[in-house]
Image: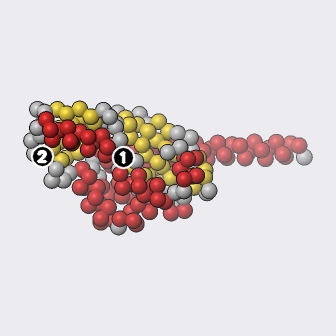
Amino acid sequence: MQMKSKTYITTLLLVSCFSFAQTIEKLKTETRKIYDANYNMDFDTIVKLSYPKIVSHFGKQKFLDKLDKDYQNEEYRMRLQLVAPVFEYGPIKQIDGITFCVIAYKNPVRYFFETKLDSNTSLLKANFLREKDRIRDVLFEPKRNSFNVRRISKLIAIVDASTNNEWRFFNMDDVAQRELFETFFQDSVKKQVGY
């Protein structure tokens, strides 16, 4: 009887460890995919890997248009700088039947402005970028008419029924996605997630 119990517990632990290892490996793969999609401006893949309620909130085409406008518009072009990202994964947490993980990484970007900025307008744009990206490290480069923004980006990865048990993401650099995360989840959940 004791032998059966020990065998059962050992089997259960092995299955749990294997399942968790698969989960973290899948999360790492999907994180790299969404990072690459953002770097390459592959908006279709970003939509596919985004949390489904974000897409349904905007509508697929409007979300695609929004992503395109976030990267390039009448005012500026934003480009992620080439780095080898090191993703730092927070603990995977199960809250009310939903699995969460916060991922942080250095993600510098450059904003190229279309019209020449003088000292006054560059200060205004720097403040705009500090607020938009929630970062202080914003450096204006007059010769390039651009800003170098060194930021720590955060993704919140989620698995729930709406994601078909696949990891899907909130990009917390995006003001609209931050607001949607605030709307979709209760304060108690946000506190436990650690965001």
From this viewpoint, which residue is outermost toward the left?
A: 116
In x, y percent, where is residue 135? 34, 37
Q: Nearer the viewer, residue 22 or 148?
A: 148
Label 2: state its secondary structure. loop
Task: Answer whether labels 2 and 1 touch (C-beta < 8 Å).
Answer: no
Left or right of 72? Residue 52 is right
Residue type, label 1: Asp
Question: Quadrant location of residue 53?
Answer: bottom left
Q: Residue at x 11, y 32 (%)?
A: 143
From this viewpoint, which residue is outermost toward the front?
A: 120
In x, y percent, where is residue 129? 27, 42
Left or right of 33? Residue 159 is right
Label 1: state its secondary structure. loop
CA separation, marks 2 and 1? 22 Å
Q: Residue at x 57, y 55 (%)?
A: 98
Checking the image for residue 36, the label placed there is: none
Left or right of 91? Residue 157 is left
Question: Quadrant location of residue 127?
Answer: top left
Residue tagged by mark 2?
114
Vertical placement of residue 178 versus 61, above or below: above
Q: Nearer the viewer, residue 164 or 98?
A: 98
Residue tagged by mark 1?
173
For label 1, the crowd category at 10 Å Cα-Cα, with few meaning under 14, some 14 to 19 and many 20 or more, is some
